[in-house]
Image (cartoon, grey):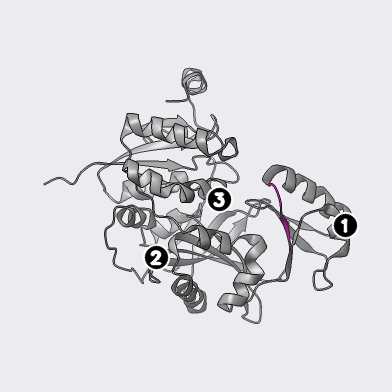
Amino acid sequence: MNEKKLTIAITGLNNIDSPGPGVPVIRGIKDSGMNVRIIGLAYENLEPGIYMPGLVDKTYLMPFPSAGSKVFLERLEYIHEKEQLDIIIPNFDAELFLFIKYAPELLKMGIHTFLPTLEQFEERHKDNLPKFAKKYNVTVPKSKAVLTSNELADLPKEIAYPYYIKGKFYEAYKVDNYNQAVFYFNKLSSKWGLPVVVQQEIKGSEVNVIALGDGEGNTVAAVAMRKQYITDKGKAWGGITLNDEVLLEVTHRIIKETKWRGAMELEMIKTEDGEYHLIEINPRIPAWVYLAVGAGQNIPEMICQLAMGKKVKPVNNYEYGKMFIRYSWDLIGDIADFEKIIMSGEL
């Protein structure tokens, strides 16, 4: 007997220099052999995932989360009416608040999600990281949430140049002097809102973990990697899976103690003397998720199963030394498709 075909909506189709996770999530789902129809949800009409052949069955433009919850929900209701969605996998930090908040309403409509709770989402915010570290006994660099550029002239003495200045949701810049700090503060606050976070630079190699928690304290999947090539936006353009027991142990402990529900990415710096400093927790699937799929842990498939209420057996093994390298690829399309998505909001 054939399993029911699932209709899965996925955001984050912007496969650019700061890529969204949507395209690799879709690839993972398609690799799993699940019987699916993929609906792309795009925020901008030039997101490459809209036009990639064979990737999505249909795309709908979404209003930006900043447009407000009413407009956001109405658009989802319209799409659901047409497509009968079973699952939505949101992949952007900026939209997660709305999806988490309205998950019960979506479920009443028959749309399943598998996301952290609002408490989990708020607790690991960049400006809450020092408090999070204290509560869960993790080492983090000295940092401070800043609401005005004047505060940059009076930072705690533990924060010295060079340090990083980080946007509320995305983007981080290394700064070497006060003028640079003010410039990036204005840029980040106007783009992502307040607070902006200042974080002391830690010297070492950046190591990351993609993980999936079942909401009951169990780690269903976890893959560690080291960034091998980093863009000027701090994004991994190449990476390799690691056998790093300390990194995985920290991940398992955080998931156990927070009872994390859904995917997450831990970004850490490993210093030369073997110390690990947590610099960020992203409450979603990272854009390098396809490396985890390639190493033997199909996290997008597991999320779909968990969203549909199935039990998923934890996977503890993966292949070490698996690499990924991103590349750009010129996609040739037709202006008619572009016009159609601009005019009707659908393609």
Give residue 13's position: percent from left, percent from top: 49, 40
Mark 1 and mark 3 lie on one chain; the one further toward the N terminus is: 3
Where residue 215 is drawn, which disc sits there? 2
> Closer to the observer: label 2 or label 3?
2
Residue 70 lies left or right of residue 33; in this view the side is right
> Closer to the observer: label 1 or label 2?
2
Camera sees residue 88: no
Residue 27 lies left or right of residue 12; in this view the side is left
Which residue is painted at 33% across and 41% down in the image?
109
In what quadrant of the picture does the C terminus appear? Answer: top left
Helix, strand or loop status at disc 1? helix
Tell me the chief SS of the magenta region.
strand
Spatial CA distance of label 1 from label 2 is 43 Å
Camera sees residue 145: yes
Give residue 181's position: percent from left, percent from top: 82, 54
Residue type beneath disc 2: Gly
Which residue is painted at 32% across and 49% down in the image?
31
How dense is the environment of label 3, judged by Cα within 10 Å: few (below 14), some, or many (20 and up)?
Answer: some
Spatial CA distance of label 2 from label 3 is 19 Å
Count numbered badges in the picture: 3
How dense is the environment of label 2, judged by Cα within 10 Å: few (below 14), some, or many (20 and up)?
Answer: many
How dense is the environment of label 1, judged by Cα within 10 Å: few (below 14), some, or many (20 and up)?
Answer: few
Residue that mark 1 sits on:
178
Residue type beneath disc 3: Asp
Give residue 74's position: percent from left, percent from top: 45, 32
Looking at this view, is 306 or 179 the one in front? 306
Magenta part of the chain: 193-200
Spatial CA distance of label 1 from label 3 is 28 Å
Residue that mark 3 sits on:
93
Q: Residue furthest left?
A: 1
